[in-house]
Amino acid sequence: MTESIDLRPVPVILTVRSVQSAPEEEEETVEFVTDGILYRENGAFVLDYEESELTGLEGVHTRVTAEKNRVFLDRSGSLQSHMIFEKNRRHLSLYEMPGGVFTVGTVATGVSHDLGEQGGHISLDYRLEIDNAFASRNIVELTVTRMNQPKGGEQI
């Protein structure tokens, strides 16, 4: 039986660490902390947060949906994208920015999460392609910490 219970959102602190390695460029690491919302929807854990000037995506809303074997990254606002990360599978999507639209491919070599009612981690290791050409290898680690402890056995 598929779980389809929608449960109420709870505030969380997200720590995001991203390492990008591109050909002929120095490795770039970005780390930031922001607040967000964690909830469950149709059996998946969902994280919603607003990007900031630090990430270069100010004005963008990000939603990360973690299912058993795959993770979705959706962005809306001044940038539109829908990326899918599934181990050993190639997924293509459109990346829409004010300057234009291009095709983005993701091929994940590692996708895992241990999200639960108190938070947890999401780990992604993937190759990024832009218009069918290798652009970079990316390792992204999200740590999710619930702001308030549940009262009386409350679950999300």
Image (tube, rainbow, N blue to C red):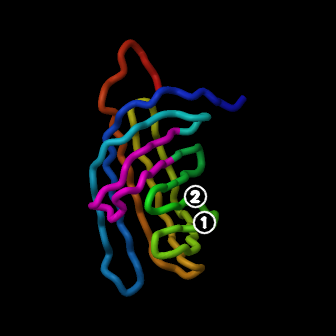
Residue that badge 1 annotates: 93
Residue 75: image x %, image y %? 48, 56
- Is residue 107 rendered magenta in the image? no
| Relative to 148, 5 lies left or right | right
Region of the chain picked out in magenta, as a range = 45-64
**Residue drawn at point x = 27 percent, y = 61 percent:** 54
Residue 152: image x %, image y %? 38, 12
Residue 79: image x %, image y %? 46, 62
Residue that badge 2 annotates: 84
| Numbered label attached to residue 17 | none
Q: Quadrant of residue 116?
A: top left
**Residue drawn at point x = 49 percent, y = 41 percent:** 46
Mark 2 is on which residue type?
Ile
Depth-wise, is mark 2 or mark 1 nearer the camera? 1
CB-based contact (under 8 Å), mark 2 and mark 1: yes
Instruction: Compare residues 156 and 124 and report the one nearer the observer.
Output: 156
Task: Label 1: state its secondary structure.
Answer: strand
